[in-house]
Each structure stands twice: as C-alpha cells, then as structure tokens.
Image: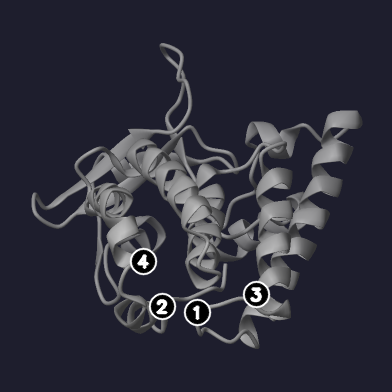
C-alpha cells in the first residue's frame, strides 16, 4: 500500500492506478512532460510539453497544476507528501539573479491568483459587464502576461486561458472568446494530444462559438455551471 500511495496516479474522482512505466517518471517543478488518462483505451499517455534532447530524463510534476509557490513551499509539500527533497534544475539553482527573479515572479503570480480567486467568489455570473467582471478580466490578463515571462508548468497557463475564455463569454466579448479558445485548443493539443476529449471539445468550441452567441438564454444556462476559480 505504501508503494501504491506513493506512486499511483489519480485517473478520476474516485480511482487511482499504478502504471509500471509512466509512474517511474521523476518529478521536476518545471517538467518536460505531462500525462493524461485515456478512458477509451485504458492507457495513461505521456506527452512532451517541452523540447527534449536525446538521453534527457523524462519528468512530470507531482505538484498541483495551480501551484506557483517558491522553492521553500514546493520542497515542503514534496517532502510532506512524497518524502524527498527536490533537486530539480529550478530548485538546485539556489543563487544568483535568475533564482532571485524567479522567487519574486512567483510571489507576484501568487498575489495575482489570489486577487482573481477572491474576485470570483463574489462575481455575478449573469451575462454582461460590471465592475467585478472587468476587474476579474483585467487581473487574469495581467496574470497571463506575467506567467508568459516565467519558467512554469504550462498546465497553469492552460488554467488561466480557461478563465480568460470564460470571462470573455461572460462579458459577451465574442472576438476575445474566440482568441482564447484557439489558444487553449493549441495548448490542449500540446498537453493532452490531438485526439483527447479536451482538445476535441476546444476544437468544437472554436467552430461553434459564434452560433452560441446567437442564443443568450442557452449560453447563460451553460455559464451558470462554470468555475472561475484558478
């Protein structure tokens, strides 16, 4: 059970599995791979999310997708959950300007995420603009721009793109909604493959989004179930 709890991967809300190959991938705070469960084939697929040189180790992240903490917090969580001290490239670079800048960037990213989530808690999910929705949109855009200058796991970028798409729909900004849907579709293909349900859903959204804006009542019904928390 100790081996299972340490190495198993969650594949649904109530299931975890142990995969003899994929589960051997070690952790890196900025990994070069990501993984996704394919329910149809019964396979855990590994995808490259960065350029990988011949002989380079394949790594995945053991941390939550929305985690942007500094080195001390990351190491603390990994030690508590998996009983090891992270020595990935990001954590080992413990001196110099690049390390200090990364730590500062992560503090700012965390602050922006907190503002986004706090705004989302009190935001009205009815279609149309108001002060709270505009604040949410502005902060999300600041966060997305800030993350683009950092070395992070692209799954966090994907989460923010989801939020930018959702708030664009809420603000009835069709042009921006299409733009973010296309970006999310490209990133989903990179993270989960071209045939995954995530990628197929985004591709369908890109082709049908204009039609969805023609029936605001149905669109409002869909928005009511969306989550705006990162």
Residue labelled with disc 2 = 223
Dot 2 or dot 3: first in sequence order is 3
The mark closer to the camera, 4 or 3, is: 4
> Tag on residue 127?
1
| Residue at numbered disc 4 | 213
Please report whichever mark, 4 or 2, sits nearer to the chain's N-terminal start: 4
Q: Which residue appears at 33% of the width and 39% of the height? A: 189
Check whether the beta carbons of the residues at disc 4 and disc 3 lie within 8 A of each other.
Answer: no
Q: Residue at x 75, y 62 (%)?
A: 112
Q: In which quarter of the image is residue 167?
A: bottom right
**SS at mark 4?**
loop
Instruction: For label 2, count other residues whose C-alpha is less than 10 Å away and answer few (under 14), some (14-19) or many (20+).
Output: some
Residue 30: which quarter of the image?
Answer: top right
Q: Which of marks 1 and 3 is in front?
A: 1
Q: CA gap, disc 4 to disc 3?
A: 18 Å
Residue 133: numbered disc:
3
Whether residue 62 can be seen here: no
Q: Which of disc 4 and disc 1 is earlier in sequence? A: 1
- Residue 104 position within the rendered picture, expressed as x and y whole percent measured from the top left: 86, 48
Which residue is drawn at the image coordinates 33% and 35% (left, top)? 47
Spatial CA distance of label 4 from label 2 is: 12 Å
Residue lying at the far left of the rendered structure: 41
Asked if the residue at tag 2 contacts the one at tag 1, i.e. Cβ–Cβ closer than 8 Å, the answer is: yes
Q: Colour mode?
A: one colour
Front-most of residues 196 and 55: 196
* Residue 186, image x, y percentages: 39, 38
Q: Is mark 2 on a helix, strand or loop?
A: helix
Q: Distance between the residues labelled 1 and 2?
A: 8 Å
């Amino acid at each position: 059970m100790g081996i299972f709890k340490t190495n198993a991967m969650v594949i649904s809300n109530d299931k975890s599995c142990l995969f003899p190959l994929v589960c051997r991938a070690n952790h890196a705070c900025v990994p070069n791979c990501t993984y996704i469960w394919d329910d149809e084939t019964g396979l855990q697929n590994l995808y490259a999310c960065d350029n990988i040189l011949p002989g380079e180790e394949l790594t995945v992240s053991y941390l939550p997708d929305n985690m942007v903490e500094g080195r001390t917090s990351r190491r603390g969580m990994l030690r508590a959950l998996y009983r090891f001290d992270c020595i990935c490239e990001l954590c080992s670079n413990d001196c110099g300007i690049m390390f200090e800048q990364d730590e500062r960037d992560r503090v700012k990213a965390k602050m922006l995420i907190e503002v986004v989530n706090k705004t989302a808690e009190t935001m009205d999910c009815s279609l149309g603009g108001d002060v709270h929705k505009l604040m949410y949109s502005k902060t999300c855009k600041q966060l997305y721009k800030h993350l683009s200058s950092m070395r992070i796991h692209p799954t966090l970028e994907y989460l923010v793109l989801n939020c930018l798409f959702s708030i664009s729909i809420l603000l009835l900004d069709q042009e921006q909604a299409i733009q973010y849907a296309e970006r999310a579709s490209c990133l989903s293909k990179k993270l989960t493959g071209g045939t995954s349900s995530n990628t197929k859903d985004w591709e369908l959204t890109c082709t049908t989004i204009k039609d969805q804006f023609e029936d605001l009542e149905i669109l409002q019904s869909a928005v009511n179930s969306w989550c705006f928390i990162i």
